[in-house]
């Protein structure tokens, strides 16, 4: 019998009745320590009082009016993002995928009068969403097989191949789209020098730098956005996941020059930037974008990275190494140990993790998690690694 829900997900048989902070409780009363945070979404954990209050207050006023009218909450969130970043202007979406679609259109509109600039460079292992444009941008067979014909105009380059990148950068390139840290691709960090080099190459040939910070943004690296560590700024940036703290919200940030082709009528969204989402987004920004909060994230990240390093040393037959930045960390597993094996073993210990490509398991806890909860998670992960090691032997 076919499921009433389209079976496009390999779901874990868990149903949660309640969440609080870094913890989730199932309908049958089991508690799990959440090191996945809805895949880097719940930056303030579950049922954060400030977000609940913001959503409840806004729900008592106005839910939806459409973008036919002024939306004060949308304007306020846009002002907060512009003040905090490189951007001059913001378009709001409901997801990271929609932000990626908007970015592709913005690039094309920017160079509409220069048809020779028809290439957008992307990289192996990237993930920009699951719309037809976003899967064409990523280009992997896992995403694109059976979905052709694909949107043309993307040039997919190997990750970390500087020679191939430099050879491709000429006046036919409209933009380079890259994640400062690949999430789905296996927590692969783009070195600061590489990000600065990409910025310089874009400037040299007149191309746009487009950063996908859907997963690594909103404080996850210990900075508001991951690219800040390299001291560069993009022309366009996609944001989602953490910006809504669990409420569907995304944003496309851009400079005035990059966005100059996006005039009235060129793009739109029925729900994008609705009052409910933007009220929550404003509260997330108020909490996350403070020096004290981000300093706490960096301190917790240092503690977690140190503990994970020791854990890897204790289980050399399971964990090959630790990678990532801030509270976006990955465990690269040894050959013969599948990510699902460690994820399943951790779940048996009451710990939720997220698998990724490149034989990596992701650790993406809420940014509000306590040091004591991180230590508890390490203890559970230690037992899970021991179990995964015995299973693989």
Image (cartoon, helix red, strand yellow):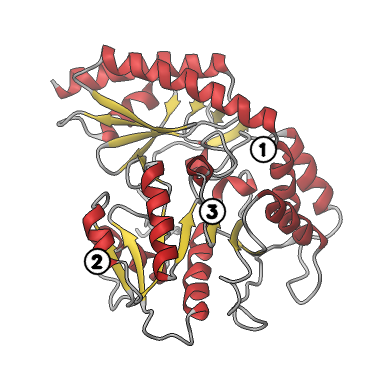
- 268 sits to left or right of 62: left
Q: Are marks 2 and 3 in contact (CB under 8 Å)?
A: no
Q: Nearer the viewer, mark 3 or mark 1?
A: 3
The answer to whether 58 appears left or right of 221 in the picture is right
CA distance for labels 3 and 1? 20 Å
The label shown at residue 233 is 3
Q: Earlier in the sequence, mark 2 or mark 3?
A: 2
Pointers 2 and 1 in contact (CB under 8 A)?
no
In-image side of 363 versus 147 (left or right)? right
Q: Is residue 215 above or below residue 372?
A: below
Quarter of the image with the C terminus in it: top left
SS label for mark 3: loop
- CA gap, disc 2 and disc 3: 34 Å
- Quadrant of the image containing the N terminus: bottom left
- Quarter of the view holding residue 314: top left
Q: Label 1, on which residue?
A: 288
- Where in the figure is residue 253, as x and y percent of width and height? 60, 61
Residue 373 seen from this side = yes
- Which image quadrant is residue 347 in? top left
Q: Which residue is mark 2?
A: 145
């Amino acid at each position: 019998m076919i499921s009433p829900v389209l079976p496009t997900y390999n779901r874990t048989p868990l149903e949660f009745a309640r969440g609080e902070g870094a913890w989730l409780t199932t309908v049958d009363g089991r508690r799990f320590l959440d090191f996945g945070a809805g895949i880097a979404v719940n930056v303030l954990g579950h049922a954060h009082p400030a977000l609940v209050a913001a959503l409840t207050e806004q729900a008592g006023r106005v839910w939806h009016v459409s973008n036919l009218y002024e939306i004060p909450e949308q304007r306020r969130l846009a002002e907060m993002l512009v003040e905090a970043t490189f951007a001059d202007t913001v378009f709001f979406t409901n997801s990271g995928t929609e932000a990626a679609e908007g970015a592709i259109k913005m690039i094309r509109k920017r160079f509409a009068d220069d048809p020779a600039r028809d290439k957008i460079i992307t990289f192996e292992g990237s993930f920009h969403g699951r719309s037809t444009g976003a899967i064409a941008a990523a280009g992997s067979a896992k995403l694109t097989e059976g979905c052709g014909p694909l949107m043309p105009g993307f040039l997919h380059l190997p990750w970390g191949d500087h020679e191939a990148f430099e050879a491709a950068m000429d006046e036919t390139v409209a933009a380079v789209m890259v994640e400062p840290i690949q999430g789905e691709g296996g927590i692969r960090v783009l070195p600061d020098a590489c990000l600065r080099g990409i910025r310089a190459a874009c400037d040299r040939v007149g191309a746009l730098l487009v950063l996908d910070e859907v997963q690594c943004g909103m404080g996850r690296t210990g900075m508001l956005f991951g690219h800040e560590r390299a001291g560069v700024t993009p022309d366009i940036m996609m944001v989602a996941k953490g910006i809504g703290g669990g409420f569907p919200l995304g944003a496309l940030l851009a400079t005035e020059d990059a966005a100059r082709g996006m005039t009235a009528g060129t793009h739109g969204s029925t729900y994008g930037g609705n009052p409910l989402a933007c009220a929550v987004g404003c509260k997330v920004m108020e909490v996350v974008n403070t020096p004290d909060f981000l300093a706490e994230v960096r301190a917790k990240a240092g503690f977690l990275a140190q503990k994970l390093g020791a854990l890897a040393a204790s289980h050399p037959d399971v964990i090959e190494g630790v990678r990532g930045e801030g509270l976006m960390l990955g465990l690269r597993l040894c050959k013969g140990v599948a990510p699902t094996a460690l994820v399943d073993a951790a779940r048996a210990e009451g710990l939720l993790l997220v698998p990724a490509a490149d034989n990596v398991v992701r650790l993406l806890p809420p940014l509000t998690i306590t040091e004591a909860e991180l230590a508890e998670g390490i203890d559970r992960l230690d037992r899970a690694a021991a179990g995964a090691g015995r299973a693989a032997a």
